Amino acid sequence: MARIIWTEPALQELDAIADYISLDSPTAAKKLVREAFSRVDHLAHHLKSGKLVEEFEGSVYREIVLPPCRIFYRLADEIIYIIHVIREEQLLHIDILKTL
């Protein structure tokens, strides 16, 4: 079983998205956060269940799509680093992933 490490930026990004959603629906925001953690926890047993990031051919990064979010991670040995969370409609820049 792999170990999961959430980076501080990824946690802050998820929190910011949930805060925005909670303006209209606190229940939906809580559901999103619970589902995000559940989907990420699933990775511990299924390391490559997320898809490769389509924007970057040959990338080492993978993602989980959980509308309205994309959760990016990378594997290093038996550790999964959750490195970035964005809204689906945002453009992804490889520089953001490479700095983490």
Image (cartoon, rainbow, N blue to C red):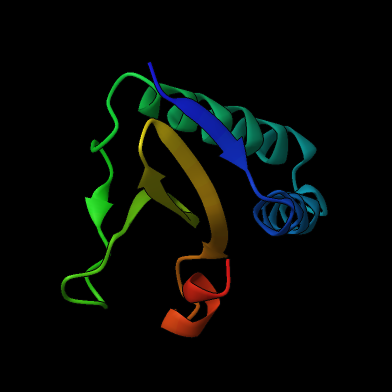
Residue 43 in percent (x, y) is at 37, 29
Which of the two residues, 59 or 28, is positioned nearer the viewer here? 59
Q: Is residue 67 above or below residue 34?
A: below
Q: Is residue 97 above or below residue 65?
A: below
Q: What is the total number of numbered labels drawn onto the structure image?
A: 0
Q: Residue furthest left?
A: 58
Q: Quadrant of residue 48?
A: top left
Residue placed at 51% from the left, 45% from the top?
81
Residue placed at 55% from the left, 65% from the top?
86
Which of the two residues, 10 or 27, is positioned nearer the viewer here? 10
Tell me if 32 is positioned left or right of 74 in this view: right
Quadrant (top left/top right/bottom left/bottom right) for the N terminus:
top left
Residue 13 visible in image = yes
Residue 93 visible in image = no
Tell me if 31 is positioned left or right of 16 in this view: left
Residue 51 in percent (x, y) is at 23, 51
Q: Residue furthest front?
A: 77
Residue 40 in percent (x, y) is at 47, 32
Residue 100 in percent (x, y) is at 58, 65
Tell me if 69 is positioned left or right of 77 in this view: right
Q: Is residue 63 above or below residue 77?
A: below
Residue placed at 56% from the left, 58% from the top?
85
Q: Is residue 33 above or below residue 70?
A: above
